[in-house]
Image (spheres, rainbow, N blue to C red):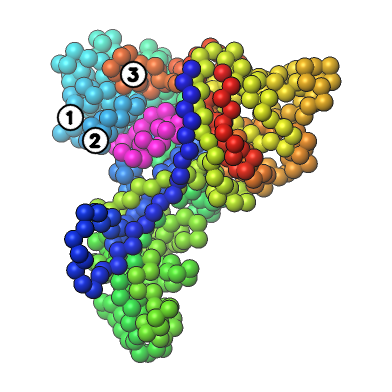
Amino acid sequence: MTTDLQTSSLSRTEARTDAPTTAPAPSSTPRPPARPERSAVIDLAAIRHNVTHLKRLAAPAALMAVVKADAYGHGAVPVARAALEAGADALGVAHVTEAMALRAAGIDAPLLAWLHTVDTDFAAAVEHDVELAVSGWELEPIAQAAAAAGRTARIHLKVDTGLGRNGFTMQTWPAAVRAAAAAQGRGDVVVVGIMTHLGAADDPGAAETEEQLTVFERAVQQAREAGLDPSVRHVANTPGTIDAANLLDPARMLNDMVRVGIGLYGISPFEDRTAEDLGLIPAMTLRSTVSNVKEVPAGQGVSYGFRYRTPEATTLALVPLGYADGVPRIGTGGPVHINGVTYAEVGRVAMDQIVVDLGEPGLATDTERNPLGAEAVLFGADDNPSVREWSRAAQTIDYEIVTRISQRVPREHVDTGRDATQAPGSSGNAAETPEAWNLTLHPTTAQQTQEIARNLAAHLRPGDLLVLTGELGAGKTTFTQGLGAGLGVREGIISPTFVLARRHPNDAEGPHPGGPALVHVDAYRLATAAEVDDIDLEETLPTAVTVVEWGLGKVEHLSDSRLEITIDRGVGAKEEGQAPDLASVLADLEAETDDGEDEPRTVTIRGIGPRWVEAAPRDLL
């Protein structure tokens, strides 16, 4: 057994960079680096939160995190790592060059690239275990590259079910699957997946989505009739994943895996629903500082073409972000948040700068209120303007706003820890509750998992809240059964998925008569804290030990203290020295059960809040 006990501080320190009026005296202490004058701040905790949330919606399907286009402008390598940490089963990119950059960074997760040209380096892709989509002409050059290397290329056949872009048409599909079967028979390729791309999933009323799903099912059947046995069928994008639950048969949309892109970054794909509505956290904050403040009279022209003139005497603020940084030139009127107030950008967006009318004269000479040097945020999470506001100002879509932020804008990757504390829809001050300790255990059998829980029960009392996280087959029910045994409640603990909550009373004739009851909750189908409140946990919490599966971001408001318990089960077994592939990941997922299969797990227990300020229990295993 390995036990790791540590404390952590999840905060970001910003360095003040006031310029001295005279040269500083030499010092042996290096000056802290200045913060970039403009930056796109990427919260990796938000990425992890979004992955976890979307995996819940997709379950039991696997989740591919799409990190093409430099992770939609967020930074492919750090975002990919954060997504994998949160449980993403695979990564997806458009180009092989993007895949090779991830491999060069040491990322060996299952990885698919799907958009190729005649100059694509298929040999490098095969050598580095990059799986390849085949939409037409690519089959033969991929097979030739694999044969030359003495390897077998792993491919996904893409069928055009109606979008009219990449993919075999249904007219060419029968010949394509026969050719793929022949290449597979030679050992040059193995067809592990069949995929398509939806064209209108962001419109819940679009009839085309149902039509595409029907065509896809026919294509899969034809592939099987040709002798192929694909283990990975994937159709759903972010909107398809989110709205699958509204279909009569969600599995038709979810299939074996979903490919999630924009949702990873906390952005809604729907016109009528915000990120907060969907339980997502925006990951990017585009910010700079006010670089100039000046008083101007009424009628002052602002920026090229004088499209804006001040209606009265006022104060103008200059922010050094422009269309060379990715701010749309057409985005006149886009919001800018300064000192707690959101203003509209005025005049044309210039190459390097935008102007804000602060709407009040005299600020430039007011020593207390002059905003020179104040942070100016164009969009971000929390109280900042949203990406949606800028996309509407620019008459475009949210996707374009974040992906167009140029490389002149440095990326700051931070970790606020918010995915483990508070999310949209929750209440209370969970984000301010400190972690007291962090304990990691490594049981190798179901019996040891139950033993950990049974021993933990000895440290519990009425009113304790436990938040239990783990994917399908991780052993959540096994853990809760051990907890119940340690508390001395009646036998018969099973998953409460379909009833949301089960109360297991203390067994008066058991080993601990008079002890607390156990309330076991499955919050998987509950999207927000408000929905959790509907099952009245506040009524039972004071007299019971409450265990909530899938509860992060939903139940923290119930108590100022909690134990957060995460159970991880390794998936994606692979040969030594090779990257895991999608098929092996899915095979592991299919093999998972929640009955305590004897495989190694990692159990992480975090004590949070005043109830757990004492040292972590060291007698759990």
CA distance separating discs 1 and 2: 13 Å
Residue type, mark 3 in image? Val
Residue 232 in picture, x, y percent from top left: 42, 23
In the image, which residues are magenta?
Answer: 77-96
Residue type, mark 2 in image? Ala
Q: Label 2, secondary structure: give it.
A: helix
In the image, 118 versus 288, the foreground residue is: 288
CA distance separating discs 3 and 2: 24 Å
Report the residue marked by disc 2: 101
Report the residue marked by disc 1: 121
Residue type, mark 1 in image? Asp
Q: Where is residue 330, by image quadrant?
A: bottom left
Q: Label 3, secondary structure: give it.
A: strand
Q: Residues within 10 Å of mark 1 (few under 14, many from 20)?
A: some
Residue 99 in picture, x, y percent from top left: 26, 33
Report the residue marked by disc 3: 191
Q: Nearer the viewer, mark 1 or mark 2?
A: 2
Q: Mark 3–mark 2 contact, CB under 8 Å? A: no
In the image, 185 versus 86, the foreground residue is: 86
Residue 41 in picture, x, y percent from top left: 36, 53
Q: Residue at x 50, y 61 (%)?
A: 383
Q: Quick check: can you spot residue 268?
A: yes
Q: Quick check: can you spot residue 569?
A: no
Dot 1 or dot 2, earlier in sequence: 2
Query: Is 594 drawn above or below residue 84 in the view shown?
Result: above
Q: Where is residue 179, by image quadrant?
A: top left
